[in-house]
Amino acid sequence: MNKRNRTSLNRQTLERLLLCYHYLNNNLHQFDTGTVSSVHIAEILNTDESQVRKDFTSIGIRGRPRVGFVVKEVVRAIRHALGFDEKNSAVVIGAGRLGGAISAYEGFVAQGLKIVALFDVNPEKIGLVIGGHIVQPLEQLEVIIKKHHVRLAVLTVPAHAAQMIADRLMKADIQAIWNFSPTHLNVPGNIIVKNERLIVGLAELSYHLKTLHEWRAHR
Amino acid sequence: MNKRNRTSLNRQTLERLLLCYHYLNNNLHQFDTGTVSSVHIAEILNTDESQVRKDFTSIGIRGRPRVGFVVKEVVRAIRHALGFDEKNSAVVIGAGRLGGAISAYEGFVAQGLKIVALFDVNPEKIGLVIGGHIVQPLEQLEVIIKKHHVRLAVLTVPAHAAQMIADRLMKADIQAIWNFSPTHLNVPGNIIVKNERLIVGLAELSYHLKTLHEWRAHR
DNA sequence: TAGATTGTTAATCGATTAACAATC
DNA sequence: TAGATTGTTAATCGATTAACAATC
């Protein structure tokens, strides 16, 4: 994520708010009074209750002593803070399995993300319907970005092709790139890049498995 | 990640080591002397040079004043620290697009991860070859875990099925679950769970896009 | 030798947790 | 009113950065 954006909300807060949002949304029915306390949420998120109050304060949610926070207000405020109530158009580049999975994922729509097109270089894939989208030739990239005012591009191409596409995206005035290619992208600081590296998750797991193993062996 | 494991390496260090590992591996040729300085690496990773030295110290890499660190030693030490030099067998449960993408991903093998089987409940998928693996019926899960001494399970099933499978995995003595299902899993503390939530990445991007938007509107 | 670069300790920074007066 | 829960300030904790003596 670039630095020019003086993000007032840090990554941790963002993640906690998201978890809280999901929890409240999925359990709306169980709050008969329509309110929830910071203690309750802290327990669920496995964090401190002051943390919860601080997070809420940071996005302008106010509660009432002895009563708590109004669930619906909290949900609405988080939606707004995370930008889920704004419509964003995205294109997916790379109609492989991962690109298909992302194109097909229904969970994004509720968060305001609409995938308007899926691209691939492979002529054999052009015209196929993958993940609910007709695969388009890469040549159309710039035209479609312009037509749909696309701000976000999801990159699921092989590593060797990623930078070339990123350069085209830059020229097409894209604002953010969600990069699933296992490679570093060189882009100017005014473009938001979010790298999604599967291998980081694997590294964590691998390390923990190893430690677990050693720990067991030592007894 | 559970707490019982007194992880000596924290998440940040793990991630920096991984990035360093990739960088060195991909640029082995350019180090004529076979050594690299903490300054050089710090620049690439966009971090502080003391940080690099500290990270290296934490996994037992020693350098020489005026010379730096031996690249090959660094690479080997990181491989070892992250557990990439140990063979781990994994099963993938859910032969959808994501499960297929993960099963097919070649990058894992070099990190010691071998996917030994791919499962699905859908009878129509059984027997198909997806991502290089024959889809097996879920009934076989326990048998195969036992047979191949599988320690890691990758979960790419719909949210509503995730907990049920997790329970079976627990009983089958799995050690770690890499959870791509968009749901929270209830598992005992001795099982390592790594949640991979696409939606968190989207939330970050969405937030930054929103902030960018507001920032532009304000001028 | 001189001086570049390490290893390590101390200082800083930022995020989490504790405490508590305000208040419904 | 009494007391539960907020909002906020202060204390703690942990991670990053700075500094510098050791050393090749």
Image (cartoon, coloured by chain):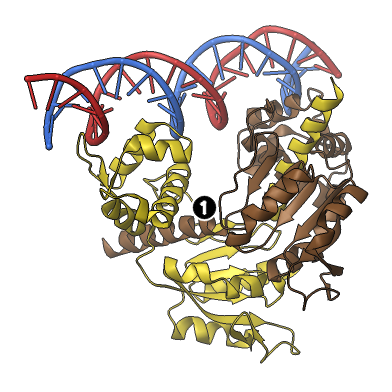
Chain colours: A yellow, B brown, C blue, D red
Q: From where the camera sits, is residue B32 visible?
A: yes
Q: Residue furthest right?
A: B147
Residue B47 place in picture, x, y as percent: 60, 38
Nearest the viewer among B114 and B80 is: B114
- Residue shown at the point (42%, 62%) measured from the top left: B209
Above/below status of A82 relative to B100: above
Nearest the viewer among D10 and A23 is: A23
What's the chain of the residue with tag 1?
A
Above/below status of C13 relative to A129: above
Above/below status of A177 relative to B176: below
| Quadrant in which the C terminus of chain A appears | top right
Above/below status of B94 relative to B44: below
Query: Is A170 on the left-hand or right-hand side of B73?
Result: left
- Residue shown at the point (68%, 50%) measured from the top left: B166
- Residue shown at the point (26%, 44%) measured from the top left: A69
Q: From where the camera sits, is residue A197 visible?
A: no
Give the total of numbered labels. Answer: 1
Q: Mark 1 points at which residue?
A: A1
- Residue shown at the point (75%, 67%) measured from the top left: B120
Residue A50 place in picture, x, y as percent: 35, 31
Query: Is B188 on the left-hand or right-hand side of A35?
Result: right
Task: Say what amino acid the circle numbered 1 marks.
Answer: Met
Residue A96 place in picture, x, y as percent: 71, 75
Judging from the image, what secondary structure is the residue with disc 1 in? loop
Residue B62 position by quadrant? top right
Residue A163 place in picture, x, y as percent: 67, 67
Nearest the viewer among B148 and A52 is: B148
